[in-house]
Image (cartoon, helix red, strand yellow):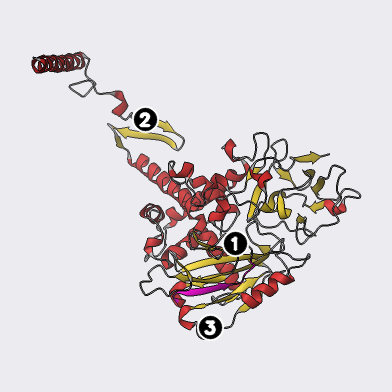
Amino acid sequence: MKTTQHTTASLAVLMAVVLCGVIATQNIAAEKPTDGYNTKIPENIMTPDEVKTRIGTLKFFDGIPTKETAELVYDNLDFLRGVETFMHGIPATSLEGLRIGQAELGAKNSNQVLIFDELMDSTSLFLTGNGSTVYVVGFLDLKKDGPTVLEIPAGTGPGAINDAFFRSVTDLGPPGPDRGKGGKYLILPPDYKGEVPKGYFTHKSPSYVSWWALRGFIVDGKPDAAVKMYKEGLKIYPLSKAKNPPAMEFISGSKKYVNTIHANNYEFYEELHAVIDREPVEMLDPELRGLFASIGIQKGKPFAPDARMKKILTEAVAVGNATARSLLWYERNKAEFIAEDTYWKHGFIGNSWQYLRDGGVGGRHFDARTHFYYFATVNSPAMAMKLIGKGSKYAWGYLDSEGNYFDGGKNYRLNIPKDPPALKFWSIAVYDPQTRSMLQTDQPIPTKASWRDKDMIVNEDGSIDLYIGPKAPAGKEANWIQTVKGKGWFCVLRLYSPTEEWYEGKWRPGEIELVE
């Protein structure tokens, strides 16, 4: 009985649905047909004869673009892809810029490394480098050398190995698997299929070229201990030469001009092509390869755009460059500020070393990746970790308390409250907005650092006022960082071995105030 009732009810529902469909069809048929059709066609699937857009008026004949419109939209398509290629290609060209710059100073082989034995200063064009730690950097050529060994000494500061797209291969030192005790790292080429020996921290790089960087800390106000540690304990050699490794060559980078920065004009695309042509196809996913190939950058093919395409790309790189710069100075995501009522911004936008938005739910955080690599270097999972008393944390200072960019001809004051949350030291470094490198002034190292500047004047409440401008206020020379009239600047706060107070937001720098 129940089955019969259920069947009858189901048939009734079905008949009602069919009847509604018939009525709806009749209503549609009853509407006035669209011109040129037998029935009414929904307007939202039609293309008007003219559409006004930001690139001009688009014209059609019955939905068919005119030749002029097709040329216009193809120019726009190539332009958009040129801009996107710049934005997404920065990690590759930035690392390539480092490789070229270091090679020009003589660091061409894996056993030849650059060491800033007298610290880095503003002579070097190096993205937001600083003069508060001893940098030692170098490159691996896994295609030429095959599996390569890095022996790093105990006691080194945080370091990393990155592939040719600035992705993490492994951390070194305290955040790495050696945990600061030193050890042997074996880096394998992307196409390596041989046996893997034991006794190493082994990692495979997705690219043939890999860049590595280590930092040594200052001891007793001098870099000597870190320099000695690296010169005695750092060894890099092909695994095939482990029994008779080549002697290390340490090339001083201090006080020397070197440009490690990618181009911001048409040459950018040529730099990117050099990387894509050298590295294995599998280094990048098909989406990125397809984007780059859409403007003529593809492995195994020459990059030779015609006059039309070159003109479009020249404009595209200019717009891409402006966009990358706007990502720093005009942040749209309020969550990236260290507090609601400040213009200080987190040093690692998105807080994901893989540049994933919302843990990957939102996919790749493209703007965060572009933002970081346009202004900085190194990729390390440790940068996104909460490491109490280890590593380092950063904050960008790029607008004054009123939200205006900094003018090198004006004077500003920055208050560093008492007890900055850094077990090792804190520093403020000032940078050139053009080069994103240390600002070149009469001060070779435009930085105030707690480990070095012991003569800074301390206020009664324990805080320190820093003065940033073209001239030092009378009697405040010890607290002054020089700027240049007619130029802008921005700064970075660094906290080495940050404490809980930083992560909890209990301490933060003062706003940078314009002083009349």
Left/right of residue 406 with respect to residue 187 in the rendered view: right
Q: Tag 3: residue type?
A: Pro
Foreground label between 1 and 2:
1
Q: Which residue is mark 3?
A: 245
Q: Secondary structure at mark 2?
A: strand
Answer yes or no: is residue 332 visible: no
Foreground label between 3 and 1:
1
Q: Residue at x 71, y 48 (%)?
A: 421
Quarter where residue 259 is shown = bottom right
Measured along the vertical axis of the image, is residue 118 above or below residue 413?
below
Quarter where residue 130 is shown = bottom right
Give the quarter of the figure containing the C terminus.
top right
Give the quarter of the figure containing the N terminus.
top left
Q: What range is drawn magenta here?
A: 146-156
Q: Secondary structure at mark 3?
A: loop
In the rendered structure, are the residues bearing label 3 and label 2 in contact, judged by CB atoms less than 8 Å apart? no
Q: Tag 2: residue type?
A: Glu
Q: Which residue is mark 1?
A: 174
Q: Quick one: 301 or 466, which is closer to the camera?
A: 466
Q: Would you call the spot at circle 1 few (<14 residues within 10 Å), some (14-19), or many (20 or more)?
A: many
